[in-house]
Amino acid sequence: MNIKRSKLTLAIAAIFFFVACAEAPKKEENKEEEVQDESVNQSSSTEAEEDLSFVLPSPIQIAAIFNRAGLEYKNNLTNNPENVSKYNTKTSKYLNFGVYSADMAYAVLNNKQQESIDLLNAVKSLSESIGMPSVFGSGQLIESFEANIGNQDTILRILTTIKRRTDEYLQENSEESKEAVFFAAAWVEGMYIGANSASDNIKVTPRLIE
Amino acid sequence: MKRIIFSSLLVSTLLLYVAAISPQNASECDIKSLKKEGISKLNPYYYSASKVTSINYKDSTQIIEVQVPLFKGEKYRMLFNTKGLPEDIKIEIFDKDINSSGRKAVFSTKTGKDDLIVYEPDKIRKHYINYVIPEGSNVEPGCIVFMLGYQLTFIKEVGEE
């Protein structure tokens, strides 16, 4: 029995040892890649990273720019908040998170109170279903939004907090690629709203082109 | 005696296993705290975006470029929190990307004096931030937190001057 137990212990130790060794080579592979990179760049003493990274602008700012250009609110341009339940795939949820964010900024900047609340709830629902419940926390943000609905500056600060928390969540979880999806969707929605209003307002067109 | 040897072997192998599979964080930066500090400095500008760049010191000088597109006629504030850097780097901002000829530096500074570096861009629309990292193979990795704020202005009410 003692011999059997000893053999078992030795076997378990051996398994863990070999698995640990299997993890180790990653560091050596990285070292090899670094050496290769250095040999390629020997002609210059400075290495420039090939991939250019971007900082994406805030959809709230985009909405504010259009608003200053005189973009008027049109009910039929925003995505109906009731459509939230229709989005069952991850892709549709990510895209519409961006769409509703742009619509929400548009409604807030045009003082559309009920529409703003409905769109905020749509954004909250999607953020929870795509695994970002920490963005809205325990619900205090929604309560604060509803309580201050008449104060545009406070509401915009709340939207900014939501944006910041979304960015933090994505960075902490190494999901920056989702940020690009959200932004792309918000951008397209912003262009859609702007383009459908541009014919009525000549000041909007140059901002759209920009 | 044999029991002690086997137990020691098992424990040491377990420890080796845990050490090998633990995530190797390139940076020890407390990103949340660094951002929190930066947010207060952005006031009265509204937070627009942020970017955390990991800085790994190597055997040669490196440049990491970050593009920041800005809207024409808008006012911005850029903030760099450099507390997460073990060694100083240089921050330069250009009007064109690194591969363009004739690009002009609109801002240049070296970290070390102040932890929070503030820059308010002029009229140029695209800004290309270059982090110039000096050589330092034995230096621990760090990070730099960039934050962008914008001035939010509203349309005037009808009848208001």
Image (cartoon, coloured by chain):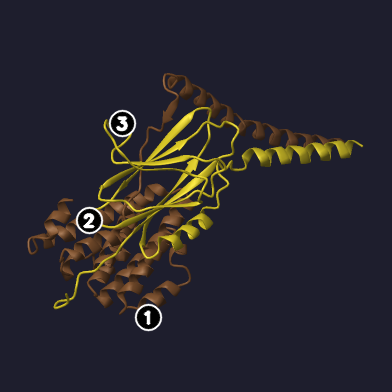
Give the structural element (helix, strand or loop) at label 1.
helix
Question: In the image, A163: left or right of A208?
Answer: right
Locate residue A188, reporting x and y percent: 22, 54
The residue carrying pointer 1 sits among few (fewer than 14), some (14 to 19) or many (20 or more) residues within 10 Å by Cα, namely few
- Residue at screen point 51% across, 56% down: B32
Q: Looking at this view, name the residue that lies furthest to the front.
A: B113
Q: Nearer the viewer, residue A36 or B125?
A: B125
Please determine whether, in this image, residue A160 is positioned above or below residue B110.
below
Please determine whether, in this image, residue A141 is positioned above or below residue B31.
below
| Residue labelled with disc 3 | B99
How far is the residue under mark 3 from the one under mark 1?
A: 51 Å
Q: Quadrant of the N terminus of chain B?
A: top right
Q: Are marks 2 and 1 on the same chain?
A: no
Q: In the rendered structure, which amino acid carries the disc numbered 1?
A: Ala
| Residue labelled with disc 2 | B73
User: What colour is chain A?
Assistant: brown
Locate residue B27, reporting x and y percent: 55, 44
Q: Which of pointers 3 and 1 indicates the residue nearer the eye?
A: 3
Q: In the rendered structure, which amino acid carries the disc numbered 3?
A: Asn
Q: Which of pointers 3 and 2 indicates the residue nearer the eye?
A: 2
| Residue labelled with disc 1 | A147
The residue carrying pointer 3 sits among few (fewer than 14), some (14 to 19) or many (20 or more) residues within 10 Å by Cα, namely few
Image disc number at residue A71: none
User: What colour is chain B?
Assistant: yellow
Give the structural element (helix, strand or loop) at label 2.
loop
Contact between marks 3 and 1 (CB within 8 A): the answer is no
The residue carrying pointer 2 sits among few (fewer than 14), some (14 to 19) or many (20 or more) residues within 10 Å by Cα, namely few
Q: Nearer the viewer, residue A73 or A1?
A: A73
